[in-house]
Amino acid sequence: MPIAEERAFNSKLLIAQVLGRGLRRPDGWQGEDPEVTVFNHVAWASQIRHLVNEILEMEHRLSSVVIQNSPYNFELNNLDYTRETDTSHFTKKGEYQLFDKGYVDLPDQVEIEDVAIEFERAVTGDHMKFRTKLEHKTHSYEDVAEELYRRLQSHDEESKDAPDPKDRTQYAKKFPIARCLEIVKASAKRARIKTGKITEENRQKILQAIGPLGRKSAKRVVYKLTPKALQTLNTKERPTISASAAELRRGDRTIFYAPDCEKTISDEQKDFFNAVKDPDGEYRLGREMVSNSHDFKTPCNMAIADATPERKFIRLLCEPENAQVIDGWLKNSPQRFYAIEYAWKKGEHPKRGDFSPDFFIKKGNTVYVVEIKDDPEIDDPSPENLKKVEYAQAHFNRLNEWLKEKGINAVYQLNFLTPKAFNRFFNQLRRNQATGFRSELDVVLMQEAGETEIARA
């Protein structure tokens, strides 16, 4: 079969249409059922059989539904508002306004971190797990301040022969070592660091604060937002989410469920559910059972993870030491429940979309709104995610102000987390110190988004 035809046959929709037409039986047909026969190329038989099976598997699905009388249901607040935009470009001349706040935003650091180490035997598949402590490399405040000063000196040296006198910088005079040390200490205090030490990761964050010195142009987008009304919704209203047999078999998606889940499965899905929960069956990559129902604190009969980082996060949500400190959590639906409108630019084309954060975690009067990303996003955040965090952070800031004015005892905190920050987030959650938590990705996104100004009408 030619390459073009092979590509065409990789379209599952096209396969469904082609096979549907070829296998359609006329009204009144009484002969044998039609069959698919592949000629000339034996390898194609297995490939088409695999694709046909995937088409058929689309009919087999498991649904995550909210249990209406679950004790883990909780209320959420949202805002309805209008938006106007204005964009301007400018060329940078002269020195940047460095450290105008007197500190650098740092993510929470844990110098000695409790971690779980997992091993799997390649032959038997047996899992082993133990907990240990990981000690991170640290630097003194003085060492970080000296390195910051040296880099400012280096930039001044490189710019001393610039053709335009305005581009010849004197940062080192404005920020001598003593001033750099003040900035390091203020940054540490804001990040609730009390040990006198800065981890290697936070040292890099401080040094990256002078990264924009080489930039010559920038763009500023001003958004005027006007909240119109406060909206209240309940986790009971979240739409059903489902996963197909093909997704579960490949491990593209994973269902998490508690031992009593089967009671909540509809009759038409029970046979498929029994096949999925077989630990040795063909769907073993797409299922994980939480052994204790009391650790599965979601109002849904099952939770569906969309990728590996989400799987890791849900596992941690269901760890007994984490489950006991939260009141409940919900995996959001991709649409039609809690969404925040945002805008971004793809190439030269403006785009608008709805951002539905992945998780809501309720602990006391605080709702932690969590979006899960993978670790590479820290080093190379996408323009779309920059806009998501910009719009979402502005939204939750307004929402918190609105709730405070109305005397409603609820606070929302937005976090963009990658697996790198999962352990620290849950460490702080267990210690009742997660308020104000910032991950590496939080800091990167907020710093980048800081070049776009948000104005509230």
Image: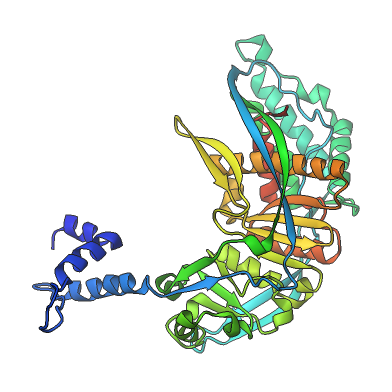
The mark total stands at 0
- Near-viewer residue (271 or 367): 271
**Residue at 80%, 59% in the rendered image:** 110
201 horizontally vs 61: left or right: right
Q: Quadrant of residue 66?
A: bottom right
Give the image location of residue 407, x and y in percent.
Answer: 88, 46
Q: Say which residue appears at 86% left-offset and 62% top-offset.
A: 432
In the rendered image, residue 285, in percent from the top left (x then y), is placed at 49, 77
Relative height, residue 337 to residue 56 (above, below): above
Q: Where 358 falls versus 228 (above or below)?
A: below
Query: Between residues 376 and 438, which one lies in front from this camera angle?
Result: 438
Residue plotted at (19% across, 63% down): 18
Name the quarter where the N terminus is drawn.
bottom left
Q: Position of residue 451 (x, y in %)?
A: 66, 30
Q: Quadrant of the C terminus?
A: top right
The image shows residue 406 at horizontal and vertical percentages of 85, 43
Q: Is residue 123 left or right of residue 199?
A: left
> Can residue 386 be seen here?
yes
Asked where in the image residue 186 lies, by quadrant, the reply is top right
Residue at 66% x, 64% y is: 236
With respect to residue 198, does 147 lie above or below? above
Residue 331 visible, this orientation? no
Horizontally, residue 140 falls left or right of residue 93, namely right
